Image (cartoon, helix red, strand yellow):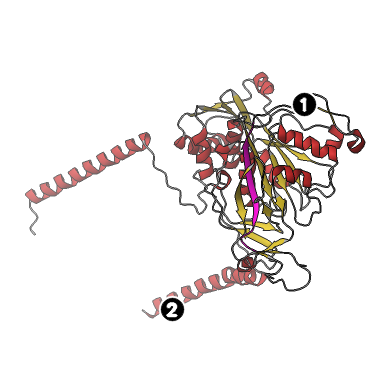
Amino acid sequence: MEVTKKTRRHFLLQSSGFLVLFLSVSVLLAWLTTRYSLDFDWTATGRNTLSAASVKVLEHLQGPLTITAYTSGNDESPLRKHIRELIKRYQKHKPDISLEFVDPLTNPDKVRALGIRMDGEMIFSYANRSEHVTAFDEASLTNAMQRLLRVQQRKIVFVTGHGERDPQGRANHDYGGFFQSLANKGIQTKKVNLAQEHAIPADTAALVIAGPQVDYLEGEIKLIQNYLDAGGNLLWLHDPLSKVNLPALSSSLGIEFQSGIIIDRDVELLGIKDPSIIMAAEYPAHPITKGFTFLTLFPRALGINTAANKTTWQYTTILQSVKNSWLERGDLHSGSVRFDPKVDLPGPIVFGVAGSREIKAKPTPDNTKTDNAKTNTAKTDSLKPTAVGSPTTQRVVIVGDGDFISNAFWENQGNQQLGENIINWLAQDDSFIDIPIAAAIDTQIVISQTGFILLGAFFILLVPAGLGLAGIVIWLRRRKR
C-alpha cells in the first residue's frame, strides 16, 4: 500500500480518535469507581464475605445500628482502616449501620465514664441498648448484635448438689466450652443447690437437670414440680448408665426412659469403632430442627417412650436413631454385640423429645412449706411463670444423652448448633434457632518428618542445582555458535 499524505492524515485522525476514545472511557470508568463498587471474594474460606449466620442476624435488626469506635490516630491509621473494612461488609447488607470514630485522647472524661479499656474498643448501640466489643473479627461483632437482639438476658439455671455436670467446668464430661460460647451470645448460666437455697430463681429461662448421680430429696422434687406447675421450662439430659431416673418427675411429664443402650453399626462407616456412639442424620419436623442438616453424634444414648403419655404435654420427636440401630439390653462388655430379637428392641429408637403445653400459669404462694423431715428445708420462695414471649406456652426438652454438648463432644459435627437450637427454643428465642454456625474448612497442612526433609531438600538443593545446570547448558550452547 502506497503511503501518501492523505493516508498519513487518515492514520493520524484514526490514532487520535482512538486515543481520545480510550482516554474518555478511562476517565468514565475512573468516575464510575468513585460512585459504585463491585467486590469479589475468591479466598478459600470466604474470609472477606459475611457468613450466612451474620446475614441472618442482620435480617432481625429492624432499626438503625450505631457503632462508635474509640481509636487514636487519624482516619488513615491501620486500626481504623481495618475496622472500616470490617463494618463495610455489614453495611452492604444493612445500609443503616453508621460508623463513627472518636479519638479517646480528645475526651478522656467521657471515655472513662463509658468504661473504655483499650484502643479500638467499639460500642454498638441499638434500640436503647448497647454492647462493648473489643475484638476485631466477624464472630465478635455478630455475637454482639445477637446480644443486642435479646430483649432481656436469658439465664439457664442448673440444678447442682447431686453430681450433675458443671456448666462452667473444664472436665471432659462438663459443659464449660458449650456454655461459654452461649455466654458470648447473651445467655448466662447459674447454678442452684435446692437443698441450700430452697428456691428456683424467678428469672430462670430454663432449668437444666444434667445427669445427677444420686437421688434428689423429696422436697427438691417438689420444688421442681412447683416450678413446672408455675410455667417453667425444663431441659432434662439423662444418661443411660445413671441409676437416677427421678420416677416422680418423669411420671408427671408423661415420659419413660427405656432400659438399655442404643447401638448403631452404621457409625463404622465414619471410622468410629464404638457402636454405642450413635449418629443422627435426619430430623423430624420441629422448630428446633428446622433447616438443620448437620450430622450429630451421641455417645451412649437411651430410648425415651411417650406412647403412654396421659398428661397435658404434647410431645414431638426431635432425635431418633437410624433404622439399622437397636436398643441393646445385654452386656456391652461381653464381647461381640449383636442384635437379639428376643431381648433387644429394633430401631429407629427415639432418644430426644420436645414437649409443650398451653397453661394458665399461677405463681405458687409465698412461703410454701415442704416436708421438713425429708428435705431439711423450711420454706420456698414464690415462683413466677418463666415463659418468655408467650406466657401461656411452656416447653420441655428431654434427651437420653448428656454427653453430646460436653467438653469432649460439643465441637463435633453439628452438636454445637443442635444444643444452641434447644436452648434458644426453651428460652423462647425462636428467631435465633435457624441461625447456622459457620464451619471453617481445614486450612492446616500436616507434613511428616520425612516429607519435611524431602521438601527442604527440593528447595534447598535440587532447585538451585537445576538452575545452575540450566545456566551451564545455555552457556555451552552459546559458545558453540
Of residue 163 and residue 346, the one placed in the foreground of this image is: 346
* Range shown magenta: 346-359
Which residue appears at 76% of the width and 31% of the height? 201
Q: Amino acid at mark 2?
A: Leu
Q: Does residue 441 belong to the magenta stretch?
A: no
Residue lying furthest right: 373
Tell me: residue 282, above or below residue 269.
above
- Characterize the local packing of mark 1: few (<14), some (14-19) or many (20 or more) Cα atoms within 10 angstroms: some
Q: Amino acid at mark 1?
A: Ser
Q: Main secondary structure of the magenta part?
A: strand
Image coords of residue 68 (percent x, y): 57, 27
Compared across the picture, whether 355 is left or right of 40 comes to right
Which residue appears at 76% of the width and 73% of the height? 335
Image coords of residue 459 (percent x, y): 57, 68
Of residue 440 and residue 322, the one placed in the foreground of this image is: 322
Marks 2 and 1: CB-CB under 8 Å? no
Tell me: residue 317, above or below residue 269.
above
Q: Pointer 1: what residue?
A: 382
**Disc 2, SS:** helix
State how far apart marks 2 and 1 are (Cα).
Answer: 99 Å
Of residue 50 and residue 102, the one placed in the foreground of this image is: 50
Q: Quadrant of residue 320?
A: bottom right
Indicate the quadrant containing the C terminus: top left, top right, bottom left or bottom right: bottom left
Which residue appears at 68% of the width and 31% of the height? 386
* Earlier residue among tags 2 and 1: 1
Q: Which mark is residue 21?
A: none
Q: Pointer 2: what residue?
A: 476
